Amino acid sequence: MLSPMTPQTSPVATGILYLHGFNSAGASPKARLVKAACDALDLPCETPNLPSRAVDALALGESLMSRLGPQPLVMGSSMGGFLATVLAERHGLKAVLVNPAVRPARLVDTMLGQSFVNAYTGERFVVEQGHRDQVAQLTPESVTPWRYLLLLVTQDETLNSHDAFEAYRGARAVLHPGGEHGFNALADYLPAVFAHAGHRLEPGVMAPVMD
């Protein structure tokens, strides 16, 4: 059982759990960049390959948290940002969200019936009503803004950054001009990410990780 946390008692993160976005993997460029930064700080890090169903993805994430010490930080991109929010609220953790999916059920609605192949893992799956029902049931009724750091772009071709501002009103936020949903500028913002976790990463230490 993790101890409750408040803005005044927020401890230094003892590890990082990175949750990738929809149809991505733990070997994605952003996941590898976070892992490399954690290695530079000698900080435990987990970047799992998540199942396509949200309940299974959360169960896997929770199973790995014990490897990350008593107070891990959760970080997620897009749909992984939604999963990170669920874990942050469920376990009283801080989180970093990269272009998070704010209304995931609505996003899944647009993909119902579509078939996908994961380029990293080879997994094949069809988005079904069960995927949509799970994310709808898991969506928190409210969030605790001070837990979060948002990394958003102004020109997200997939999600509307204004939705994230509204959903996490009061959270710390960094707005990157232009950009894209994949947030290729993540390396530039890792010092802010790790400062939110209570660690110091010198600017310019990490170079972008390319495929």
Image (cartoon, rainbow, N blue to C red):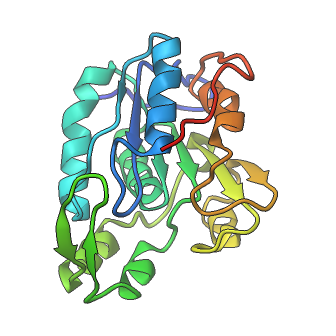
Residue 177 x %, y %: 82, 57
Compared to residue 141, the image places residue 21 above or below, namely above
Q: Give how far across and how far down residue 52 sits, in percent.
A: 24, 63
Decide: is 36 above or below 24.
above
Residue at point 63%, 74% (across, down) = 157
Q: How many marks?
A: 0
Is 20 positioned to the left or the right of 197 in the image? left
The quadrant of the rendering that contains the N terminus is top left
Q: Residue at x 26, y 51 (%)?
A: 50
81 sits left or right of 185 in the view? left
Residue 161, compared with residue 111, is above or below; it is: above
The picture places residue 78, in percent across and down from the top left corner, at: 49, 60
Question: Between residues 99 and 39, which one lies in front from this camera angle?
Answer: 39
Q: Residue 141 sits in which quadrant?
A: bottom left
Q: Is residue 1 visible?
A: no
Left or right of 111, for residue 96: right
Vertical position of residue 87 compared to residue 7: above or below: below
In-image side of 67 versus 164 (left or right)? left
Residue at screen point 38% across, 55% down: 83
Q: Residue furthest front?
A: 211
- Which is nearer the eye, 208 or 160? 208
Q: Quadrant of residue 137?
A: bottom left
Work out whether residue 76 can be spotted: yes
